[in-house]
Image (cartoon, coloured by chain):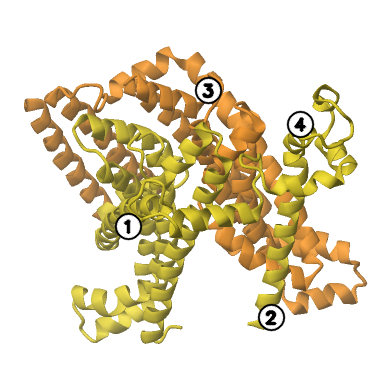
Chain colours: A orange, B yellow
Amino acid sequence: MPLVIAAFLLWAGAWFLNVQLANGRGADTRAVRLAVPVIFGLTLVAMWELIVRGLALPMVILPAPSMIGARFATSIPTLWTDFVQTFVKGALSGFAIGGLAAFFVAILVDRSDFLRRGILPVGSFVAALPIVGTAPILVMWYGFDWQSKAAVVTIMVFFPMLVNITAGLQETTQMQRDQIKTWAASYWQGLWKLRLPAAMPFVFNGLKISSTLALIGAIVAEFFGSPIAGMGFRISTSVGQLALDMVWAEIVVAALAGSLFYGGIALVERWVTYWHPSQR
Amino acid sequence: MKQVLIPVITVVATIMAFWYAACVPMNIKFALMTAERQGEIVSPEGMMARRDMSALVLSVKNPAQWSDTWVQAKPRLPAPHQVVTELWKSTMEVKPTSKRSLVFHGWVTLSATLLGFVIGAGMGIVLAVGIVHSRAMDMSVMPWAIASQTIPILAIAPMIIVVLNSVGLQGLIPKAVISAYLSFFPVVVGMVKGLRSPSPMDLDLVKTWSATKAQSFWKLRLPASAPYLFASLKIGVASSLVGTIVGELPSGTGQGLGFRLLSGSYYGQTVQIWSALFATAILAACLVATIGAVERGVLKRMGLA
């Protein structure tokens, strides 16, 4: 019990500190902007540890962060195999295939106004559907290995990307298009030098949405059948064995992979669309 | 209307035609096998000869068997009309309380989704109000709320089912918990954006009318947030549904659309998988459309649309 009380005291102290920092004079400095969420996060983890120990919660309900950390450190080879199987083979290849396919379809559609008016509503409709449900079908078609996961990811990524690229290609004004025409630019020159660069903020928006979808698709597809590696496989079997520390370690990997992937895309975005108001 | 309707119908018709065409190579091997057993002449003869041939070549060589690929009981790819028939049969022709009825499974999924969505969206709105009014909360919670959108939180769904099961909670509640936390973060982020959308000019204006903090919240910030709120509610309800379906995979209660997907994939009942998939799609479309209708009504009364 004293540990639980300590947890709440710690909470009160850290919150007081955060309130002071946030309302203090240096609230807009970079250090404070970074420190406040870090203090908040660390306090949550510390409270978690203290409460789990204080109440002696069994691991089947909630393992303490220290246990998760220990399990993470001892099973790095397993976690790495799972990461490669799910993220590199499943999610990344599907992400690339789906993104490129959407890109080519968007360029094809772009030449016809009729097609664009038809595909945009259908695409945004499909993008809102629970596409992850196609996983059992695709696992049946392409087998248990990463190919079926890549297929699920491809479909999940395709529609948001298609909608975003198509919308992005509409971004230029008539004036700009007319101007480049007066310079005798061909269709492809206009596309390459004017409309594609203008579409880039939309493309990156699509890529960011898809980066999360790709990981979700690859993990959930493994719940429907997988070889004996992969993050989804490890999560579902460890849940079955009540080895929740392993599940949490796997979730840490998923969280790291997801945020690094997203961060990487955001970095490239900053480099490509440096001219856009949101990046300045 | 005509501007959109005709292109959309064309695109959908193209997809349908492509689907029927795809059924031929997908199902041709089984169709040839059955046809040969019934004494029809197929080319080439004998299963062994066909085993390593590509499905496309077989399809081109045997146009007589094309129609057989659209009527199989357990096809690799069912034809659209088979899925529609199965949907009709499992919704209209069996009692809604039967375990073979998609209405029954759909209701199980829908109730968990709605309960979770209401909880998640409600908590999201409350937290967003807190974030807008407390600077400490904004600086502590907001970065985590944004970061949480980049990680696949759906991965903890199976664990939540098992953990809540071990403390005695089964059925509706665990699934609702999953769908609640999936709708929570999009709503927080969208609602914070919405509550912050009034310009400093507007905020100053209500201040010159000596409005209290509560008054400027109810009369300026909250109405201004409506478009953002509805946009994020639509995202939230769609991910709530995905959460419920994934939560139904390991629960083993034998109920819900997610369970139908899983059992269909265990027993190779492809038509059942496809009909469950379409049922989830219809459900998602209805949920999003409902929120869209409420949105139009509310924004119209507010004079925003």
What's the CA distance linking mark 4 and mark 2? 52 Å
The foreground one among B248 and B191 is B248
Helix, strand or loop at label 3? It is helix
Name the side, left or right, on which A171 lies relative to B140.
right
The disc, 4 or 2, on the residue closer to the chain's N-terminal end is: 2
Q: Position of residue B123 (x, y in %)?
A: 26, 56
User: Which mark is nearer the camera, 3 or 2?
Assistant: 2
Please give the residue where the numbered disc 2 appears in the rendered image: B3
Q: Amino acid at mark 2?
A: Gln
User: Does the image show residue B141?
Assistant: yes
Q: Chain of mark 3?
A: A
Q: Amino acid at mark 1?
A: Leu
Residue hosting label 1? B114
The residue positioned 59% from the left and 34% from the top of the image is A139
Q: What separation in Å lies between label 3 and label 2 (alpha carbons)?
A: 49 Å
Q: Quadrant of the N terminus of chain A?
A: top left
Q: Secondary structure at mark 1?
A: helix
Q: Is residue B254 above or below residue B285?
A: above
